[in-house]
């Protein structure tokens, strides 16, 4: 068996191979083999963080706090170029055959790096009642990510996305009336084993908590307004009973 190489020496993110896997049939075959009990020595229990070379990773989705964390890889903004879903049926001998009504779903999403669109990433996910595995492939091909300012910032630096699961945890803490500084301290204490992969599982600063709290208040105000509108529309004789509206526009 080949020696296992870890991304940034992080034991949670072994590299499957030092090149991207581009053929769909090979991607599906590899993921299905792992789901069926194949060699898991090169399966990640976390999302690879800050990969800067052509590489392929396999991730056990069940080990993640949220499937949305798959896209939080510590790199600057990615542009979603396409999202395609294929379905497969399981034959009697256990192999997969493409079929529109099959029980196995294979979803592939293609991204380009915003700072340099020649750099691409593909996230593939194979789901079935027997397992849920993902593959992430990076294709740099000699290109480099260009540091750019984020938002209104005047500094040119990498901006990495905070894990969605961490933001969800932050919202729950805010609802429990826990102070932002205490939320950050709790987060730091939970990451007592420092690895590259869990760096995206930390809040950047207290301002991020306050912004999260502010956005929750804004959403609550909108939800209350929509509730009031619906309540008035349901009342007999209401002047807005017959007025149509679309809250999504």
Image (cartoon, rainbow, N blue to C red):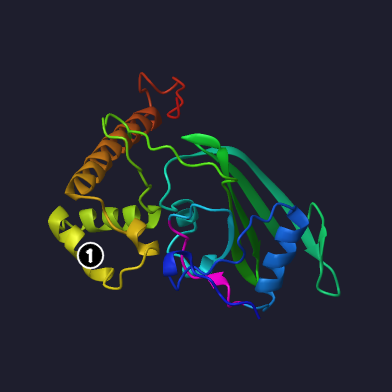
190 sits left or right of 110 in the view: left
Identify the magenta region: 40-49
- Which x, y percent locates residue 208? 23, 46
121 and 145: which one is in front?
A: 145
Residue extending farthest right: 92
Residue receiving disc 1: 188
Determine if the magenta segment contains residue 33.
no
Mark 1: give few (<14), some (14-19) or many (20+) Cα within 10 Å.
Answer: some
- Which x, y percent locates residue 130? 65, 72
**Count of marks placed on residues:** 1
| Above/below status of 202 relative to 119 | below
- Which x, y percent locates residue 183? 19, 59
The residue drawn where x is 46% and y is 66% is 46
127 and 41: which one is in front?
A: 41
Res 103 seen here? no
The residue drawn where x is 40% and y is 32% is 234
Main SS of residues in magenta: loop
Residue extending farthest front: 142
The residue drawn where x is 25% and y is 51% is 204
- Which x, y percent locates residue 224? 29, 37
């Amino acid at each position: 068996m080949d020696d296992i190489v870890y991304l940034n020496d992080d034991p949670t993110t072994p590299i499957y191979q030092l090149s991207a896997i581009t053929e769909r049939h090979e991607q599906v075959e590899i993921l299905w083999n792992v789901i069926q009990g194949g060699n898991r020595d090169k399966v990640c229990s976390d999302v690879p963080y800050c990969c800067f070379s052509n590489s392929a990773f396999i991730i056990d989705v069940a080990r993640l706090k949220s499937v949305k964390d798959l896209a939080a890889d510590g790199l600057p903004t990615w542009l979603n170029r396409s999202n395609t879903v294929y379905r497969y049926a399981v034959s009697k001998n256990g192999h997969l055959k493409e079929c529109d009504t099959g029980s196995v779903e294979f979803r592939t999403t293609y991204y380009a790096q915003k700072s340099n669109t020649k750099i691409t990433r593909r996230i593939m996910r194979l789901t079935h009642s027997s397992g849920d595995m993902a593959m992430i492939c990076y294709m740099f091909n000699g290109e480099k990510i260009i540091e750019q300012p984020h938002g209104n910032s005047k500094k040119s630096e990498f901006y990495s996305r905070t894990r969605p699961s961490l933001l969800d945890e932050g919202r729950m803490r805010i609802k429990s009336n826990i102070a932002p500084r205490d939320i950050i301290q709790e987060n730091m204490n939970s990451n007592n084993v420092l690895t590259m992969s869990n760096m995206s599982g930390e809040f950047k600063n207290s301002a991020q908590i306050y912004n999260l709290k502010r956005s929750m208040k804004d959403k609550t105000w909108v939800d209350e307004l929509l509730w009031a509108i619906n309540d008035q529309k349901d009342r007999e004789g209401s002047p807005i009973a017959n007025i149509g509206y679309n809250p999504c526009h």
